[in-house]
Image (cartoon, helix red, strand yellow):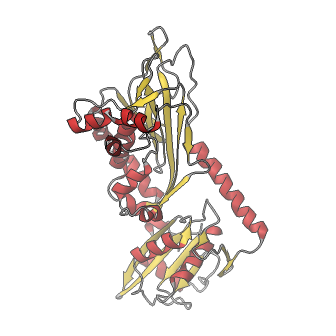
Amino acid sequence: MVNINGKPWEELQFKDVQDYLSDPDSNENCFFEYKIDKVEPAKLVKEISAFANTYGGYIFLGVDDNKNIIGCTAWDEQRIHITIHNGITPTPQFDVKCFSADDKIIYVIKIEEGAMPPYITNKGDICERVSSGSCVVTESGKLNQMYHKRADQFARIKNKIELPEIKIESATQSSVFAYLDFGFSIATSSDLKMREKFNNANLKAIGDFLRSFQAGFSISLIGTAYLFSVGTVIAHDMRGNQIPAEVGCHNFMEVMRDGSVRGRVVLVADSAAEYVDVKTIMAFMDNIYPKVYSMIFGDDFSELFIYAYQYEKFTVVKQFVPIYDMSESDSKETREMFEQYLPAHRRKYGNNIMIIGGRIPRSDYQLIDRRLLEKEKVEYNSTNLYRELFYSFYKSLGYIDTPAKAKD
């Protein structure tokens, strides 16, 4: 996409905006739109949808059609963000800069060409940018192109965040009963800021945190991603002999520079076991992985976050009954509650047996954005975003009631 006055977005200053507007050739076109302060949200949403569905572009909010800086009083950054998040599905990738001079405030909204079109307004319109205006798409050929582009992007996401299956050899990985794969591909308003956070991560502090769970851990740089693992590389064959584990047969999380993630949690037990302790999923998905991720990307993550596409897949290798084997470090009440979990389930629903696995969602990926948190009546902040990104539908594996409800 073109730059304003030849400046990268991160370096853009108010003088660059002034210089651009003073250029006789800087009229509204495929990439630039000027809007005064009184613009209706529906009109702004239409323009942003059109830019996202076409080649991307900029909206100067607080500038009239004659390129005069009028200023804004009715709009602020929060209103812009909420209008975009609530007005377009899926949320396009965008960023906002605020400039102030001579007691006038203007906003420059940058909209990226969308990777997941069509971007549909809350009125059901699919818009495109044509010359200096935006109009509703009615031609079936253009709509088909958008949907093909979306399908191609889902294929790229699949290749990016999904892991190959573990090749289980009956003579080697006899202790593996199941494993959970998870991942999400993320879009933010600034790849540069995400990379800075990634490059400046305090890996020693993360190492200290992982060591508090288990001495056997590893932090590695694999290409352009950090790999965080907990556990050893040793497995056992059916005779109990120690052998190297199969590739990918490990508890690990891979964090990419843009904030995208893929990872795995492995459930193991004695090869002749009927019961398998599954609290590992709870420990990793509730505590370990989100904490490590938050230590990289910080408390202002929600300010950069736009959306993420998420999935998880649970694979059953051998049938088993899941149990929660709580330790002495847990409270007496917690231990008693989980001790009654399986008996309470059996009284109502029969035995709890893991026979097959599954994938969530069944097709494509789950979209996580501001609207999802609002729908769940959860405050939009970094803490809740981390919790949502790492939420697993397989934490209460096979159990229908919650532990507290099962106890009643």
Asked whether residue 70 appears in the rendered view, the answer is yes
The quadrant in which residue 28 appears is bottom right
Name the one closer to the observer, 124 or 232.
Answer: 124
x and y percent of residue 310 in the render? 52, 50
x and y percent of residue 67 in the render? 53, 88
The quadrant in which residue 77 appears is bottom left
Quarter of the picture holding the N terminus: bottom right
x and y percent of residue 52 in the render? 60, 68
Which residue: 66% across, 72% down?
Answer: 126
Quarter of the picture holding the C terminus: top left
Query: Residue 108, relative to residue 215: is it above or below?
Result: below
x and y percent of residue 334 in the render? 26, 38
Name the one closer to the observer, 308 or 221.
Answer: 308
Name the one closer to the observer, 90 or 333.
Answer: 333
Q: How many marks?
A: 0
Which residue: 41% across, 86% down?
Answer: 74
Which residue: 65% across, 48% down?
Answer: 155
Asked whether residue 162 appears in the rendered view, the answer is no
Query: Residue 370, relative to residue 351: is it above or below?
Result: below
Query: Residue 320, relative to residue 226: is it above or below?
Result: above
